Image: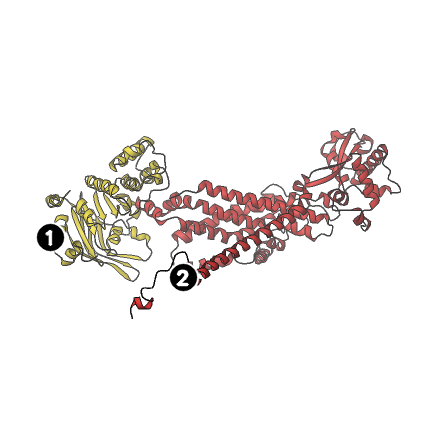
Chain colours: A yellow, B red
Amino acid sequence: MNDMRILDRDVSANTTKITARGVQVYYGENHALKDVDVDILAGTVTAFIGPSGCGKSTFLRCLNRMNDTVASARVLGEIKLDGEDIYDKRVDPVVLRARIGMVFQKPNPFPKSIYENVAYGPRIHGLTRSRSELDEVVETALKKAALWNEVKDRLQSPGTGLSGGQQQRLCIARAIATSPEVLLMDEPCSALDPIATAQVEELIDELRAHFSVVIVTHSMQQAARVSQRTAFFHLGHLVEYGETGQIFTNPRDPRTESYITGRIG
Amino acid sequence: MTDATLHGGHAAPRSLLATDARTRRRKAAETRFRLYGLTAVGLGLVALVFLMWSILGNGMGAFRQTYFEIPVELSEATLDKSGTRDPAVMKKVTTVGYGKILQKALEAELAARNIDTGTMKAKDVMGLLSKEAPADLRNMVLADPALVGQTITFEAFATSRVDGYFKGRVTMESAARDSNISPEQLAVAQKMADAGLITTQFNLGFLSMPDASELRPEAAGLGVAILGSAYMMFIVLLLALPIGVATSIYLEELAPKNKWTDMIEVNIANLAAVPSIVYGILALALFINFMGLPQSAPIVGGLVLTLMTLPTIIIATRAALKAVPPSIRDAALGVGASKMQAIFHHVLPLAMPGILTGTILGLARALGESAPLLLIGMVAFVKDFPAAPPEGLMQPATALPVQVYQWTQRSDPAFVERASGAIIVLLAFLLIMNAVAIILRRRFERRW
């Protein structure tokens, strides 16, 4: 994929999946995220870039309420999934996380079999009625994650015995087995070698057909390669958000330009 | 001033083969430290070897016992006049009656073997046998009335002095100073041994029989103590493991981090260091005086040991939970597991080896604890076995470490051997528990 193709991407027809308005996050006294407005589009890969500590991972973790597990974190503002406020008192984060899956920075398969790793989500959410149905879900998820051919003969061997790239794809399979609508990825390739990274990136592009993907990345090349829209965060502010081609070739904010050209961050 | 002048400019490079004083000092310090370490380990090993040698040397004798093998005629005329073989009727013949039968049999056997007892009184000849022997014979006959009318070979306990003589603990010289035994008696015993009337066998009774009085150490066993300890360990495991694990899960995974939970945390850590006798006083006041539970009962012992073990289990479990990487919790929450599902499906199984190890080590400590049990009356002399649980939990029993303590209090030197033997049994149990802990850890250990 080269820059020419970035410019060709047309995403204007897609509908909005997640709307964030005026999002503030505090960790105790520390104001980590300041007044962020973002629209995540359906069927689109959105990349969050920015220097370390800029709040991009924090914002990602707001989208499926993983920040709830941090005792000192406070989230203000409004985040809507299909028009429903996900921070409403009536919303059970457990149900929300089944609809918004997440893949983490470090591959973190459960120390169980490959099959059990993928089957866990559908099982706890009661998505399947029979063993054969579950087998099917596991197979589909592993196929979507481009891992099926490598592991189909050893589904009962431990997931922790796979290579780093395979483990990360297993985690992706686990996340998509519950058929989420949005897939959040927090630097999914930072622990992987270039070949595994390429495989995961290819996978992300394919996943776009089924879900909205939001990816946090440190690599600007990666953002340019996989995303249609890019948001640049700096010191807790959302500096610029737009089509990936525009951000990388014609940034409006001088801070974005400085970051992209390597002068800050 | 520049760096070059500071370090003496471009001095000629020193040879790698020559060591300067500073390097030599550093090396000497390292060698010295190594020696300190080796000395410390060596001292520890010497202490351990000495301990094992002294305990095994003193205690192994307790597992072997000297018996007289005497043919005894159990005549119907004396034991069961009615001829009904009804144990209820046969109970009328007392231990004294059996003692007379035994004495007759012994005298007859000595005469048959031409063993000269010289000027010894009949009482002294009978004194070679344990005072427990007639009671043993009576119990045997009452348990199996069909024996009446037969002549059986009865294995009678030798008295502790005779037993000691054949184990080398008692000598002719010490017998001369001993009011309980005389050299003449030992000479007769030696003749009987030469005639093949005396055997030394593995002493199963040491593990199965209850305690015996001061006068008959040869009949003292650990049965009640082992059973009492087992009952208490059962209670501790049943109460301390679930309570401890639940507490740890709440404190580690669910509780908010504030000054209250901080205070609880500090207090639990302090409780682990409270002297065990303090728990004994607590149990005396709470369980016995306030709640009215019986003294000497395994239930009270189990409860006090539970209190004592809980902090250990909580600390071990919290450490095990802390050691589970947060990424596993994230992974579970990320696919939409609830907090409880994340804990019970993923975190707890991974923490299991640590929890089990901590629990077993806590149990091992509880098994070896005597001080709190002394305060709740478990130091009593208990001859009767407690019944099976649950009612047996309320009946008097003793515990292994308390039995050791009791036996070391008694004057008869034969009890030194018994006490060391009891220590061997206790150590064997502890070794088994530690081995189980290691095996469980290996079995459940999984990498992530």
Residue B230 visible from this viewpoint: no
Q: Nearer the viewer, residue B63 or B38?
A: B38
| Quarter of the image where one finds residue A136 | top left
Q: Which residue is mark 1?
A: A250
On the rendered image, what quadrant is the N terminus of chain B found in?
bottom left
Whole-percent x, y for residue B423 in the image: 63, 47
Whole-percent x, y for residue B392 in the image: 61, 44
Q: Which residue is painted at 62% across and 50% down in the image?
A: B51
A62 over B221 or under it: above or below: below
| Quarter of the image where one finds residue B447 | top left
**Which residue is outermost to the right?**
B119
Identify residue type, mark 2. Lys
Secondary element at image label 2: helix
Question: In screen coordinates, is B402 left or right of B169?
Answer: left
What distance separates the C-alpha of mark 1 from that of mark 2? 53 Å
Q: Which residue is painted at 51% across and 49% down in the image?
A: B240
Number of labels in the image equals 2
Secondary element at image label 1: loop
Q: Nearer the viewer, residue B146 or B124?
A: B124
Q: Chain of mark 1?
A: A
Q: Nearer the viewer, residue B336 or A147?
A: A147
Identify residue type, mark 1. Asn
**Callout 2 crowding tier (Cα within 10 Å): few <14, some 14–19, many ≥20:** few
Q: Which residue is mark 2?
A: B259
Question: In screen coordinates, is B447 left or right of B244?
Answer: left
Residue B365 visible from this viewpoint: yes
Q: Nearer the viewer, residue B226 or A47?
A: A47
Whole-percent x, y for residue A157 in the image: 36, 35
